[in-house]
Image (tube, rainbow, N blue to C red):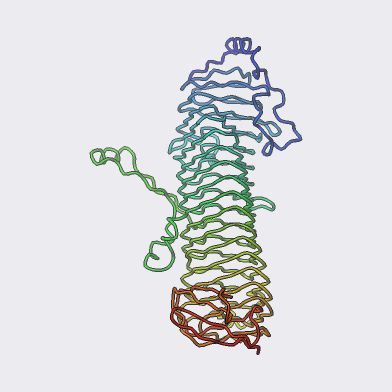
């Protein structure tokens, strides 16, 4: 590669550009006391900046700290650099120390490096990639890297320090070798329209990953978004705004630490979607995850292309979860839609659902939580899953949860049968309901608790599968709210609330209503997915000795509410 940046030419350029606004040598592009990843970079043109003009195999620059060879352009000083043009089969290397920032403004840039990252930051300094408004840039790499400085630098954009992607322009990143974007420090996205395709993973912020704004579309053979650092305080992902669409062979969004969503819109499909599930007729293919569809060569050139370009084996992924957290899963806002062949929501610690609008389709569990799960707001709809919610304990204070499952609806502490088999007193498996609404339409037991059910408010509507139970638990106490249990109930429920207990036929997929005699608006309306012959309703809204009409299809009975 030729480098048109000799001392004479640089001097000429500096003289030529000295009178032009914004081209003086930068002194300090970011104040040291300000966090570069949260700073506003929109006014970059009001500050001094350098120019890098790429011309396929050469570069023209007025930056004194720029050097070039046949395969790379190196920036060794912090500052703002305006990049434009095309750079082919060469690498932009950033080598700035900790405390300095290299801000790269991409103005319709096309960069390709066949044997390594297109942008490689080896120093501990911060890199800002600013996408200029109204422009489109493309970064690509080749399938086979030539590791000369160290293995592991295997992304189209790879930084040893922190990385921010911001601005109002568009960026396409196509990773043929492995990953698209990787920061060994913190990674933040705060704007832009970013399209990513990656043979392996999409965006990796090893210490943390933050999405504050922008539109991201990721198609990855492995993981979509990840923060893998397992150390104390690291590995966190924060999603607060923007829109993210992920199609991944492995996990969609996974954090070793805390994964929090406070706003934005997220659509994630993993492992081929819930159709590639762990139960039913397609179960034999479940668990084989990773990889993207590969285009077949044209028929007339198939033999030649196959010989010249052998097909790569796809990456293999151990899991294909939607949102996964190592320590805590916190969903307090935003809209989340997950279609996953594995667990849709997963946490090795606790899980808090407190305001998000969530739609789940899971090939295994809709929500798995090794610790305590809490529902205190928002709306959660499980369209399909093997099992609905598995956790150590569950607290419901507000919000709405609707479960459509092939097997158990909610299973806590391993379930009642597991507790009986162990012969030990379980410290987990308790469900506490003080508000909110839970509707269970399951193919197995609706609630299976190793511990106790305690309900003082809210609404529980339980529709189990055929020959299954609405409630299995060590003990049940209902002092307030509403509990509707359909089918045979082997469990004694302690309650002083008025109750309706009736033997009647409930037809599957027809609305079942409970209406006070003489009233038109029903007190309860529930559409079961299975037929039942027994009904139990406990509610503090029932009036003792008042009569109620129970109706399902053509079946109607009149029954009084009584107290035990």
Q: Relative to 179, say whether 530 is above or below.
A: below
Q: Relative to 49, say whether 325 is above or below.
A: below
Residue 442 point in image, percent of width and height: 49, 73
**How many numbered marks, from 0 up?**
0
- In the image, taking residue 175 as reference, residue 456 lies left or right, namely right
Corner quadrant of residue 509:
bottom left
Q: Residue at x 66, y 79 (%)?
A: 540
Q: Nearer the viewer, residue 2 or 302?
A: 302
Residue 183 point in image, percent of width and height: 59, 41
Residue 71 point in image, percent of width and height: 49, 26
Q: Nearer the viewer, residue 298 or 73?
A: 298
- In the image, taking residue 199 as reference, residue 525 lies left or right, namely right
Q: In the image as oriented, which residue stretches furthest toward the left?
A: 300
Corner quadrant of residue 564:
bottom right
Q: Residue at x 39, y 61 (%)?
A: 285
Q: Residue at x 64, y 30 (%)?
A: 102
Q: Nearer the viewer, residue 21 or 272?
A: 21
- In the image, taking residue 469 as reference, residue 33 lies left or right, namely right
Q: In the image as oriented, which residue stretches furthest toward the bottom?
A: 564
Residue 480 point in image, percent of width and height: 68, 77
Q: In the image as oriented, which residue stretches furthest toward the front?
A: 518
Q: Residue at x 65, y 35 (%)?
A: 126
Q: Relative to 140, say whether 429 is above or below.
A: below
């Amino acid at each position: 590669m030729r480098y048109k940046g000799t001392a004479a030419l640089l001097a000429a350029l500096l003289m030529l550009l000295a009178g032009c606004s914004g081209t003086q040598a930068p002194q300090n592009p970011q104040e040291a006391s300000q966090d570069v990843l949260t700073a506003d970079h929109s006014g970059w043109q009001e500050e001094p900046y350098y120019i890098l003009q790429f011309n396929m195999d050469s570069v023209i620059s007025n930056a004194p700290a720029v050097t070039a060879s046949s395969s790379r352009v190196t920036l060794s000083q912090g500052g703002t650099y305006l990049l434009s043009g095309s750079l082919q089969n060469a690498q932009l290397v950033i080598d700035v120390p900790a405390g300095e920032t290299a801000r790269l403004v991409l103005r319709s840039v096309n960069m390709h490096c066949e044997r390594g990252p297109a942008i490689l930051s080896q120093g501990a300094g911060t890199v800002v990639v600013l996408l200029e408004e109204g422009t489109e840039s493309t970064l690509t790499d080749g399938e086979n890297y030539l590791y000369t400085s160290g293995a592991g630098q295997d992304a189209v954009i790879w930084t040893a320090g922190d990385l921010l992607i911001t601005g109002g322009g568009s960026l396409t990143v196509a990773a043929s070798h492995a990953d698209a974007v990787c920061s060994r420090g913190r990674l933040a996205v705060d704007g832009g329209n970013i399209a990513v395709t990656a043979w392996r993973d999409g965006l990796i912020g090893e210490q943390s990953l933050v999405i504050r704004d922008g539109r991201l579309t990721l198609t990855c053979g492995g993981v979509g978004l990840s923060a893998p650092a397992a150390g104390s305080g690291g590995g966190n992902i924060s999603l607060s705004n923007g829109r993210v669409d992920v199609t991944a062979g492995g996990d969609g969004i996974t954090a070793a630490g805390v994964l929090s969503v406070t706003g934005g819109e997220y659509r994630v499909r993993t492992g081929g979607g819930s159709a590639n599930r762990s139960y039913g007729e397609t179960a034999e293919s479940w668990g084989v995850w990773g990889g993207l569809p590969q285009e077949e060569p044209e028929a007339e050139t198939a033999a030649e292309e196959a010989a010249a370009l052998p097909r790569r084996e796809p990456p293999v992924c151990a899991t294909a979860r939607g949102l996964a957290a190592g320590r805590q899963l916190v969903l307090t806002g935003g809209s989340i839609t997950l279609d996953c062949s594995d667990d849709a929501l997963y946490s090795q610690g606790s899980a808090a659902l407190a305001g998000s609008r969530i739609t789940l389709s899971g090939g295994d569990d809709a929500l798995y939580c090794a610790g305590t799960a809490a529902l205190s707001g928002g709306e959660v709809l499980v369209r399909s899953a093997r099992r609905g919610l598995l956790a150590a304990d569950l607290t419901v204070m507000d919000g709405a949860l609707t479960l459509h499952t092939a097997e158990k609806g909610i299973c806590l502490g391993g379930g009642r049968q597991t507790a009986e088999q162990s012969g030990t007193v379980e410290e987990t498996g308790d469900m506490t309901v003080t508000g909110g609404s839970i509707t269970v339409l399951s193919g197995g037991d609706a609630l299976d608790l190793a511990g106790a059910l305690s309900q003082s408010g809210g609404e529980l509507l339980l529709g189990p599968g055929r020959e299954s139970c609405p409630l299995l638990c060590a003990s049940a106490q209902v002092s307030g709210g509403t509990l509707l249990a359909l089918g045979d109930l082997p469990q004694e429920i302690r309650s002083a609330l008025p109750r309706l207990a009736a033997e009647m036929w409930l037809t599957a997929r027809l609305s079942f209503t409970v209406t006070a005699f003489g009233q038109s608006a029903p007190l309860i309306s529930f559409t079961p997915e299975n037929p039942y012959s027994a009904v139990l309703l406990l509610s503090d809204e029932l009036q003792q000795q008042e009569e109620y009409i129970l109706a399902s299809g053509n079946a109607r009975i009149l029954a009084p509410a009584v107290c035990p």
